[in-house]
Amino acid sequence: MAKTSPKGGTAEHRPRITMRQIVIVIVIVLSVWFVLANTGTTAIRFWIPEVQAPLWFVLAGTFVVGALFGWLIGRNRRPR
């Protein structure tokens, strides 16, 4: 037997898109666009050694590390 909605007819089970998901998608799209727009080479200094790397690689790595830390911090703050 199909469930009926308050307005009549059958209720559709559509996934709900939250504001958080929309913001996450926007941040990812803008980050990818920013990374692809910066394709030069840059020097990175780790105190003593200096490394030459493509700027897109540095930006993508920074984004991934930041997202990982944000996820870990957010996971620890949720009530149990």
Image: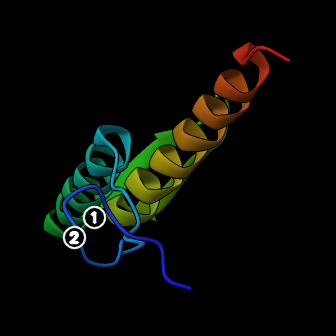
Residue at figure coordinates x 47%, y 72% from the top left: 3
Which residue corresponds to mark 2? 36
Q: Nearer the viewer, residue 54 or 10?
A: 10
Q: Nearer the viewer, residue 42 or 66?
A: 66
Residue 38, placed above or below residue 19: below
The residue positioned farthest toward the left in the image shown? 37
In the picture, the disc for residue 19 is none
**Three-letter amino acid code at disc 1?**
Val
Residue at figure coordinates x 86%, y 18% from the top left: 80
Q: Is residue 43 left or right of residue 80?
A: left
Q: Secondary structure at mark 2?
A: helix
Quadrant of the rendered structure where residue 11 is? bottom left
Task: Residue 14 in the image: state x and y as whole percent.
Answer: 36, 70
Residue 75, placed above or below residue 10: above
**Three-letter amino acid code at disc 2?**
Leu
- Quadrant location of the N terminus? bottom right
Q: Is residue 43 left or right of residue 65?
A: left
Mark 1 and mark 2 in contact (Cβ < 8 Å)?
yes
Which residue corresponds to mark 1? 32
Residue at figure coordinates x 38%, y 69% from the top left: 4
